[in-house]
Amino acid sequence: MALVHLVPSVQVLSKLNHHQYRCLMSSSTSPFKVFSAIRAAAASGPPRPSAAAVSALLPRFGGGVGGGVGVGATRGFATTPPPTFDFEVSPATRRPPPAKKVLVVGSGGLSIGQAGEFDYSGSQAIKALKEEGVFTILINPNIATVQTGKGLADKVYFLPVNPEYIEFVIERERPDGILLTFGGQSALNCGVALEKNGALKKWNVKVLGTPIRTLELTEDRDLFNRALKEINIPVAESIAVNTVDDAIAAAEQIGFPVIIRSAYALGGLGSGFADDANALRTLATQSLSLSPQILVERSMKGWKELEYEVVRDAEDNCITVCNMENFDPLGIHTGDSIVIAPSQTLNDAEYHMLRSAAIKIVRHLGVVGECNVQYALNPYSMEYCVIEVNARLSRSSALASKATGYPLAFVAAKIAMGYSLPELRNAVTKSTTANFEPSLDYVVVKIPRWDLAKFAHVGREIGSSMKSVGEVMAIGRTFEESLQKAIRMVDPSFSGFQSLPFPDLDRALSVPTDRRLFAVGKALMEDNYTVDEIHELTKIDRWFLHKLDNIYQNRLALQKLSSQADTLDASYIPEELLIKSKKLGFSDNQIAALVGSTEPAVRFHRKQLGITPFVKKIDTLAAEFPADTNYLYTTYNASTHDVTFEDKGVMVLGSGVYRIGSSVEFDSSAVGAIRALRESNTKTIMVNYNPETVSTDFDECDRLYFDELSLERVMDIYELEHSSGVIVSMGGQLPQNIALPLHLRGVKVLGTSPVDVDRAEDREKFSRVLDSIGVDQPAWKELSSVEDALQFADGVGYPVLVRPSYVLSGAAMNVAHDHKMLEAFLTLASDVSPDHPVVVTKFIQGSQELDVDCVANDGKLLVYAVSQHVEDAGVHSGDATLGEGVGGIGVRGLTPEIVSQCKVIAEKVAKAFKITGPYNMQLILTRPPVVEGPSTEFSLKVIECNLRASRSLPFISKALDVNFVQIASLAITNNSFEEYVPKKDPMTVPRDYKAVKAPIFSWTRLAGADPVLGVEMGSTGEVACFGRDLSEAYFTSLLSNHTNFKNLPPKLSSSVLLGSDDATDPEVLKHVASRLSSVGYRIVTDTEATREAIQSVVDAESVLFDGEAGITNLADRKRAVQIFRDHDVSVVFALHGQRAKSIQDPGYLLRRATVDMGVGIVNESRNAVVLADSIAEYVAGGRNKFESALSWGEWLQPVHIA
């Protein structure tokens, strides 16, 4: 039965006339008449019935004044379709919008805890505002996002998301409204600050949607607790404090163990559990360096954790859109938990108790828009506590929206514009109003993605502070089916629910890590633990564990067939067992491995038996009533398709889960491709499973498959849809990895041939092609033994770069400076053998790296762009500060001759690989040092080439105002593209600006991670800003990095701390010290050696961490904090050239202490020079930081290249 909840507000009901009132009180009145009356009442005059009469009427809808809606409201609609009134208000009666010009505050660069979900929600908000004819202004420095592209906001500012810049934009643009709830915690914090400093009142800007007071109530833990106690909603016993000593006292009053929560923090930043005073002191010190207030709270570890997504309008209509349950018990941040929607283990009483409480809370707090309520529920009683309320769009909101087909962000934006829920139609289903609660006939499973293995010294334990970098969402008709899909989505190397080795299994079960699910697998599959034994160690609900046991029992049945192993014929698998396996989410590859066959053989056998997946809709109405939606998923737990297959659309494969190396920039390219194809009247099919993305939004493509990007699933969809072709070059490395297998199975892969893609991916084939076309490359060799690698390194000379083939984001890449390091790194790269060769390349020191992004058609170059790394070569391109035309202070620019030679190489590569579509090359530029005098000599060597869209493509497209993705997409599909190709080479056009892209790191999230740059990527996001020169663009970009610098330039007369080691360039140290001391900063050093290195130009005031005592002080976080405060350290230049070999390394300890205390850090020499010069210009040169505060359109205005 579809549970459809309808909650008319008291205000609306009080407008009924007496005839309408008597009619509605009659139990025989049809739902259609009920809602006709309500609709008429909403548009009518003053209240008529008495308050008592209205109270008597409310139970007719299953609720009471101020309460939720009960089951009674659902019964009358079990056999009657929901009303399908058109609630579009006619132009004559539509109310004017509350604001005509609205500033939308974005979230900035992606970081752990605040990722791509805000690109989705912000994009939807802007679309909703544009429908109302509202002029929209967006401030967001994340240049990789869809929302910052053309066609959405009327004006875009690539500027820091902080109160200072937002107020400047307000003063400049004079909006009459501002949206704060679509930009994550960053936007919310800015809004609260602007309210407190009086800026919103000063400029007469109205906060649309949830008011500031409500935001303050939900963010200030003490105020929040008091507000909930007013309505008798239980909260965990807690005390808000502002000092470490107060935190200790509060914990002693409450009793250990306790949990610390930070106010105004995203993703649980600064939170954690403390079992004693020592642990609490360490945790509270770090938390208070990141937030002004913390909450010491009773620990409820082991309770169930649940969430309700609630929507409320200004007329008090209120519904719950989705409830979700964490697989893991309380104690793990919900962003790091496996989440299931709808909840599976609640009984009806528990569900409605929490639902009613959620509605009561949201009404009392005065939320206007969307809200997330998180609960802890005692698994042995009805006792519950509210953990927190997010009065804004969140990660959970994005998940709930995609899981239910209810466009939460879009509806929330419309509510902010003054609409009520009954007036709005659900834009996804097109057949219900926004006042209907979704009902699901499927199960959604979300699993986070972690990349903790990329970082040395980072533990794999997960807890109350979020560590994951992305998430996947799988849909199926059973928990088992959805879970196994989701596991493969997180990492294709996993076959499904499986076992992994753990040296201490009981600890792996009892202490949560990013791989605890596989510890459960080992316990079930290898160590014969019972469900009860696993439950006692993990506190995971037995219902989930029994479902996992179902998967295990089916594995056993399949493994029994392995004695009949046949790699060519899988017909020995019984039909009944094969059907059951597919219904439980087993992939063909997984089945093949268990029975001793091969994936092609299993697929052939399955299709021979007619066992193929069915396509179902996400329709929000449990399929009980017709719904028009393009949200689709595949399942084996069905008997019919919900759609017909006549479009023969082009499939675009998305990026999959966000991870380090593949993030929102690839979603931007995928969305750009879809839009370009739809504009050319080409039907589109998107395949992706990332709920954070714009590409998985309901209005971007003709058909959306929320499903796996595996070879099996892409083949299934391609065959079902009779697709006219597949684009694999827009979603990053994941789609690229299956391009050749798709091609070999007869799939029409559009664009560059997968055979040529393979030639570029295979290092040896690629090198032979470059040799044949006269393009230079560093000396390299693919080697199959450690001995051969050592011999090669001796021949070319150290340093050398070690990496496996087919990598993304520099996985397992390292620079070795001697034999010992090379041997160690070879063991990291792989088990070096003929089956697992590694590539060893001569590493060229003192050179610069260039990125060349291109689009070609049939081997002919159409457009290209050259970007320059600010850092010297040796920093992964994803972690590098990238500039378009960046020549300036501290960085040697590119001459026309260098750019011209880059173009020649791009043309040769396009022709050799017969490229159609996007491609990216990375080149090493070497030239004589400047001190040797002017020289035109240079050399360019190609170090890498990817025949797909790159990480830098959105940046280049926006910096040059050339839509590379549109040109590539049209060329790939044989559509006309000539009008979009610039007539004049964009690289030769004089420009009045420079653009700089800076990386975002999440060091504070990853306890123990070493904040250094190298050949392996570690950044989680990026920002980019414009300026009149390198100094201005670089300075603004760094200030946009919300995870590092809180303020630039640093406070005058504060201290700048310089750190170095034997490998640090002393000239860089001297330059930084000289420049900053000359404009009023005090210079302090880490050691006596650093002080001596700069004493010829500056006499350092103090040495802070010299010798063994210094190491001891750095390791003692309380002492380190005091030293930083005593010397008023505002920025640290940690310019150590050697990698830390242990956590006792003084350079590591200094870097780690710096980020833990929230102090800005510079950890690379070239960046240090540029920043020091930039700060000096702003302090002594009279430069105003707001001179760069122009809109994107204003920066581009003087340039005409078409």
Image (cartoon, helix red, strand yellow):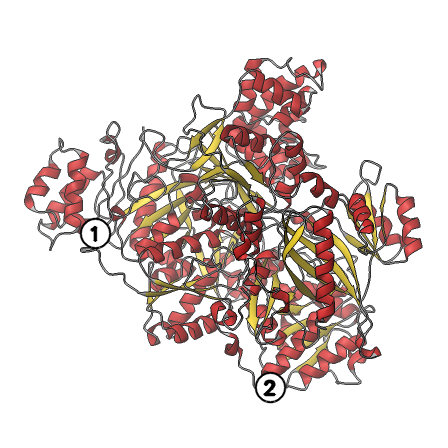
Q: Is residue 811 visible?
A: no
Within-10-Å neighbours for mark 2: few <14, some 14–19, many 20+:
few
Q: Quadrant of the N terminus?
A: top left
Read off the residue under disc 1.
Answer: 90
Q: Position of residue 859 (x, y in %)?
A: 68, 49
State the image coordinates of residue 351 (x, y, percent, origin top left): 36, 37
**Which residue is at a point 53% across and 69% down the rendered structure image?**
1200
Give 280 or 107, whichever is nearer the viewer.
107
Residue 628 percent across, percent down from the top left: 35, 36
Q: Nearer the viewer, residue 632 or 815?
A: 632
Q: Determine which quarter of the picture holds residue 347.
A: top left
User: Label 2 sits on what residue type?
Assistant: Gly
Image vertical order of residue 1138 relative to residue 1091, above or below? above
Looking at the image, residue 260 lies above or below residue 503 = below
Q: Mark 1: which secondary structure? A: loop
Q: Nearer the viewer, residue 636 or 199?
A: 636
Is residue 466 shown left or right of residue 777? Answer: left
Q: Which residue is mark 2?
A: 1181
Where residue 642 sits in the image (x, y, percent)?
Answer: 41, 28
User: Which disc, if any, is residue 1003?
Assistant: none
Q: Element type at marker 2?
A: loop
Mark nearer the N terminus (2 vs 1) = 1
Nearest the viewer among 279 and 557 is 557
Q: Residue furthest left?
A: 19
Task: State the image quarter where residue 1094 is shown.
Answer: bottom right
